Amino acid sequence: MNLDNYPTHQMQDPATGESHKYCAASKQWSHVDPTVADDKALHNAGEDRVYLLLKNKYTQEWEFPTTTMT
């Protein structure tokens, strides 16, 4: 059983009235509550890996940078 994607709370969109279920421990972006403000939440944890993808202006393809980015 995948407990990372276990729904922990539900919110209703005031604009559309649609109900959305969110998972507090999910690592999948579509399951994460966008209003999480807790600095110690898994979604804000500093040890998580973040990858930078850039669009090549010559080939118009998304790729990892091959040189140092400052």
Image (spheres, rainbow, N blue to C red):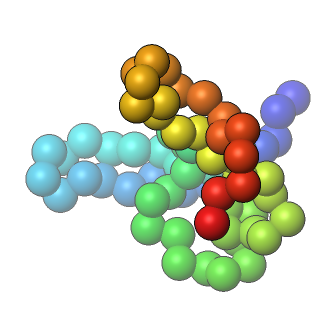
Quadrant into which the C terminus falls:
bottom right
In-image side of 47 versus 22 (left or right): right
Whole-percent x and y of residue 30?
A: 51, 39
Whole-percent x and y of residue 52?
A: 63, 46
Residue at 77 percent of width and 44 percent of height: 4
In-image side of 2 versus 24 (left or right): right
Quarter of the image holding residue 24?
A: bottom right
Q: Nearer the viewer, residue 19 or 56?
A: 56
Whole-percent x and y of residue 35?
A: 44, 67
Q: Nearer the viewer, residue 52 or 15?
A: 52
- Position above or below: 10 against 70: above
Residue at 18 percent of width and 47 percent of height: 17
Residue at 58 percent of width and 39 percent of height: 53
Can the viewer see residue 5? no
- Position above or below: 35 against 14: below
Residue at 38 percent of width and 56 percent of height: 11
- Position above or below: 26 against 56: below
Whole-percent x and y of residue 42?
A: 74, 63
Can the viewer see residue 54? yes
Quarter of the image holding residue 1?
A: top right
